[in-house]
Image: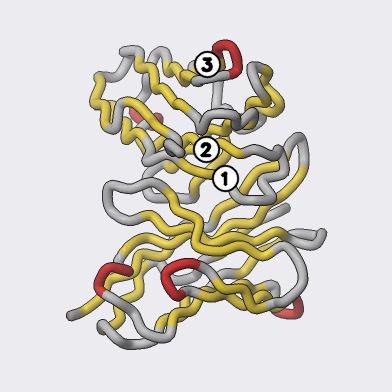
Amino acid sequence: EAGVTQFPSHSVIEKGQTVTLRCDPISGHDNLYWYRRVMGKEIKFLLHFVKESKQDESGMPNNRFLAERTGGTYSTLKVQPAELEDSGVYFCASSQTAGGVYGYTFGSGTRLTVV
Amino acid sequence: AQSVTQPDIHITVSEGASLELRCNYSYGATPYLFWYVQSPGQGLQLLLKYFSGDTLVQGIKGFEAEFKRSQSSFNLRKPSVHWSDAAEYFCAVGVMDSSYKLIFGSGTRLLVRP
């Protein structure tokens, strides 16, 4: 089966611009998660979708971040306007069960650099 | 508060030597514990997981980890390291609050000397 796919793999944008990251989960996985790693620190939870609904967005840093999941399939994470501190690696993951009992499958990440 | 500590930021070992990466967690309930690896240019790959039962769990690529409740630890081990094991390793605990999520440690970067 195809894994979790993320686009783009790298993005360099200027402060104040908008960037949209995309994640295609494994087909049939209702649960989709976004995580990010900033400045080599811990990988931190951003939010969790169950199908098209946001189950938990407690990790979203501020209202410059907007996540959507169209029709319960792929998801986008938009940062508008981007700030320097948004630089980092954004990971998407999907799982069959919400409890992640079988572990999540992560994508290879999008490295975002804001200059 | 839930947390995961990986005290070693970098570890260097010689190829063929044994490896132990440390992980300590803080979580009030019975933990679900994971080790992930990220090789250069790759995503996070699950190495192994612990939910219950036998405290010594086997994973892929010859890795194993031992859950020690009394020490709140879940250390990763490999008896003989290969050059291809050079990567960054992340320990994580699964927690349930608003939803189920993973709390990660800050990672340990493994360098392998030829």
Check disc 3: other Cα within 10 Å, few if <14, some if 14-19, many if 20+. some
> Which residue is tagged 1?
A104
Q: Residue at x 61, y 69 (%)?
A: B24
Between the residue at mark 1 and the residue at mark 2, the CA separation in whole angstroms equals: 6 Å
Q: In which quarter of the image is residue A59?
A: top right
Q: In terms of sequence position, does the residue under pointer 3 or pointer 1 come before the other?
A: 3
> Which residue is tagged 3?
A66
Residue A49 rendering spot, x and y as whole percentages: 64, 26
Between the residue at mark 2 and the residue at mark 3, the CA separation in whole angstroms equals: 17 Å
Check disc 1: other Cα within 10 Å, few if <14, some if 14-19, many if 20+. many
> Which residue is tagged 2?
A93
Q: Decide if residue B54 is on the left or right side of residue A81.
A: right
Q: In terms of sequence position, does the residue under pointer 1 or pointer 2 come before the other?
A: 2
Specify the subunit that label 2 lies on.
Answer: A
The residue under label 1 is which amino acid type?
A: Tyr
Q: SS of the residue at dot 2?
A: strand
